[in-house]
Amino acid sequence: MIGRMLVTMLVLAAVAAPPAVAKSTEAKGTEAETAARAAATAGTASAGSAGTATAGGASTARGGAGSAVTATAGASTAKGGAGTPGTSAPAKCNPRRGTTSIGESWAQRRLSLPEVWELTKGAGVTVAVVDSGVDTRHPQLRRARSIDLTATGARDCLGHGTAVAGIIAAAEIKGVPFTGVAPQAKLISIKQTSDGTGDVGRLAAAIVRAAELGADVINVSVQAGDQADLRDAVAYALAMDAVVVAAAGNVQKEDGTPAPAYPAAYEGVLSVGAAGPDGARADSSNAVTPVSVLAPGRNVTSTWAGRTYREDLEGTSFAAPYVAGVVALVRARHPGLDNVRVRRRVELTADGGAGAGTGAGMVNPLLAVSAILPSEQVALAPRLAAPLPGNVVRPAPPEDSRAVSISIWVALGALVVGVLVTVAGIAIPMGRRRGWRPGTIDRQT
C-alpha cells in the first residue's frame, strides 16, 4: 500500500511539473525570447517567425530539458522526457477574431502588383505552405489542397497558415481590396503544427512531402534550430528544383543574443527579412540570419481563419509569403529557369539593401518578372552546318552537239534572211522609180 501511494505521488508530481514551453511569437520581449530558446533547445519549430506574429494563445511541448522532440509524418504523438507519450492535438481550436472590413494594403501598393499582373498571375505554378493549415472555407482560398501531418485535422486553429496562404495566392474577388501576390498559383497546405509549435522532424517531413508533390515553391514561415533531418530535407527540396523561401525569424540564444533561424540560414534558401512601409528593416526582423531580400512585414493585411481578415500582422512570417508569391510569378513568366537562377533573379532585381539584415533590399516583383539579366543571356557559337549530301547538287548534263549545230544553222539562216530583207528594202523602191530600166552611165569626154 505504501509503495502504491509512493508511485502515485511520483506520477502526480511528474504531471504537475511545468513542461518546456514554446510560445508562438505573439508574445513579446522576454516571453518571445524564452519561446525561441525553448524551440532551439528542445528540438521544436515554432510557427510565427518574428516580431508580433499572429497565432493566439501559448502552446506547450513536453519533454525533459534539452531533449529532442521526435515524430514521424502523420503521427499524433511526440516523445520526450522519460518516454512519456504526448499528443499534438490542440486543447482548443479558437483562433483570434478577425474582421470582415478591410482597406487596401500598403504592401500591395508598394509592390505595384496590378502592373505585374498584366504580365503574369502565377498560373501553372504550385506553392506549398508548410504551416498550421489553411482555412479552405475562406472564399479566397477555396482552391487550396490540404494535407495534415499532425493527425489533428486540416483545420487551421491558429490562423497563421491561412494568413500566409492568403498573402501568396488569395484569389481575386470583385469588391475585395486584397488579393494574393500570385492569385492564379496553386496552393498546397501541409499542416505541420496545430498549436504554434512543432517538432523539427515533422517540419522536415513536411518539406520533403512538398517536394515529392512537385511544389515549385515551398514557403516555410517557421523558425527552428539546426538539425540534420531539417538540413537534409531542405537539400532534398533544392535537388528537386523547388525554391525554398523561409522567414529569417527572431531566434535568441540562451544569453539573449540573436542567433540564426533555420531553415532560413541554410545555403540555397531564399531568406526573407521584414520591412515597414518606409522600406527599412523592422526591429523584429532577425539581423543575424543571412537575409536574401526584405518584404512587407509590418501592419500586413491578409486572409484569416473563420472567413475573415487581419490588418495588423507583423513579423517575417508574413514577409516570407510575399517573396514566395513573387517567386511564383517569376517561375510562371520564366519557366525555363531553375531554382538557383530564380533565386538570383529575385535578389538581383531587389531595390538595394542598407545595413545588416537587409540583404539585397525590398523585393521588386515587376523587375523580378520583366528584367533582362545579362547573366541569363548565354552566348553560344552557332552550330556548324552539316555537310550537304552528295545527291543535293545535280551534275551538269553532257553537251548536246546536235542541238548546238541546229542552233548555229538557225542563227545563220536568220542572219541571211535579215540581210536579204534589208537589201530588198533598198533595191525595190529604186527599181520602181526607174520603171525597172537599167541605169545609164554618163561618160564625159
Image (cartoon, helix red, strand yellow):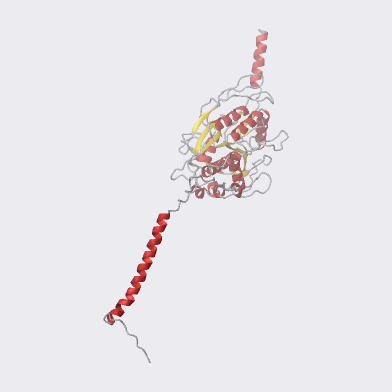
Residue 294 image position (x, y, % from top left): 61, 44
Q: Nearer the viewer, residue 112 or 66?
A: 112
Left/right of residue 162 with respect to residue 62 in the rendered view? left
Viewer-proximal residue among 83 and 93: 83
Residue at image x 63%, y 22%? 79
Relative vertical location of residue 156 with respect to residue 320 in this rendering, above or below: above
Q: Quadrant of the C terminus?
A: bottom left
> On the picture, is 375 further left or further right than 188?
right
The percent coordinates of residue 12 (x first, y second) are 64, 17
Residue 133 visible somewhere in the drawing:
no
Most extreme residue toward the bottom is 445
Relative depth, front residue between 143 and 384? 384
Could you say which quadrant of the image residue 261 lies in?
A: top right
Q: Position of residue 17 (x, y in %)?
A: 66, 22
| In the image, farthest residue toward the left | 435
Residue 46 appears in which quarter of the rendering? top right
Q: Is residue 68 above or below residue 301?
A: above
Residue reaching furthest to the front: 445
**Front-most of residues 124 and 359:** 124
* Residue at the extreme right: 255
